[in-house]
Amino acid sequence: MKKFFAEFKEFIQQGNVLDLAVGVIIGAAFKGIVDAFIENVINPLIACVGGTDVGFVIPLIKGQAIDLGKFISAILNFLIIAFVIFLIVKSANKAKEIANKKKEDEEEETTKECPFCKSEIPIEATKCPHCTSDLPEEAEEE
C-alpha cells in the first residue's frame, strides 16, 4: 500500500498533472463565459425566430415537449468551445514549430576539426589555437 501511495505522489508531482489541472480550471471558467454568451445573446435570438420565450418548443402529450432551442444552444455552445480550443492548439503548435526551427538554426555548426591535431576549433579560425598550424583554405570551406 505504501508503494501505491508513493507512486501516486510521484504521479501528482509531475508537471503534466499540474498542467492538466490548470487546463481544466481554465476550461471550466471559459465554459461559464460561453454559457453566458449563449444564454444572454444566442437564446434570445433563437426565441425571436422561434416566436416563444424559450425558442423552438414542440409540445407533446401529457405536458412533455421537445425543446429544440436548448438543443441548438448546446450545439452552438459546443461549436464555440471547440473552435476556441482549435485556435489555441493551432497557435501552440505554430509556437512549438517556431521554437523548434529556432533551436535547429542555433544548432548549426560553429566549430570544425583541425586537420593536423584533430581538435575542435571555431569555424572562422585561420590558425589552430592548439597546434598553431596555419589552416589550409580548403579546410575553411568545409
Image (cartoon, grey):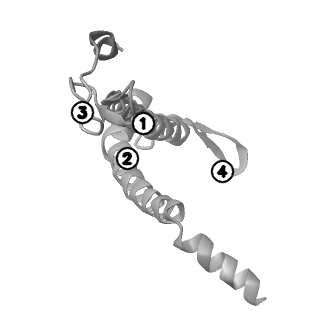
Looking at the image, residue 130 sits to the left or right of residue 66; the answer is: left
Structural distance between the alpha carbons of marks 3 and 4: 98 Å
| Mark earlier in primary sequence (2, 3) | 2
- Residue at image position (39%, 40%) is 43
Q: Nearer the viewer, mark 4 or mark 2?
A: 2
Residue 119, image x and y in percent? 38, 36
| Mark earlier in primary sequence (1, 3) | 1
Looking at the image, residue 113 sits to the left or right of residue 13; the answer is: left
Q: Amino acid at mark 1?
A: Ile
Residue 138, image x and y in percent? 32, 10
* Mark carried by residue 63: 4
Q: Nearer the viewer, mark 4 or mark 1?
A: 1
Q: Amino acid at mark 4?
A: Gly
Structural distance between the alpha carbons of marks 2 and 1: 7 Å
Marks 3 and 4 close (CB-CB < 8 Å): no
Residue 78, image x and y in percent? 50, 39
Q: Quadrant of residue 118?
A: top left
Q: Nearer the viewer, residue 80 or 70?
A: 80
Mark 2 lies on residue: 34
Q: Nearer the viewer, residue 133 or 9?
A: 133
Q: Label 2: how many residues lie within 10 Å, few (<14), some (14-19) or many (20+)?
A: some
Q: Secondary structure at mark 4?
A: helix
* Mark carried by residue 80: 1
Q: Nearer the viewer, mark 2 or mark 3?
A: 3
| Mark earlier in primary sequence (3, 4) | 4
Q: Secondary structure at mark 1?
A: helix
| Mark earlier in primary sequence (4, 2) | 2
Q: Nearer the viewer, residue 27 or 95?
A: 95
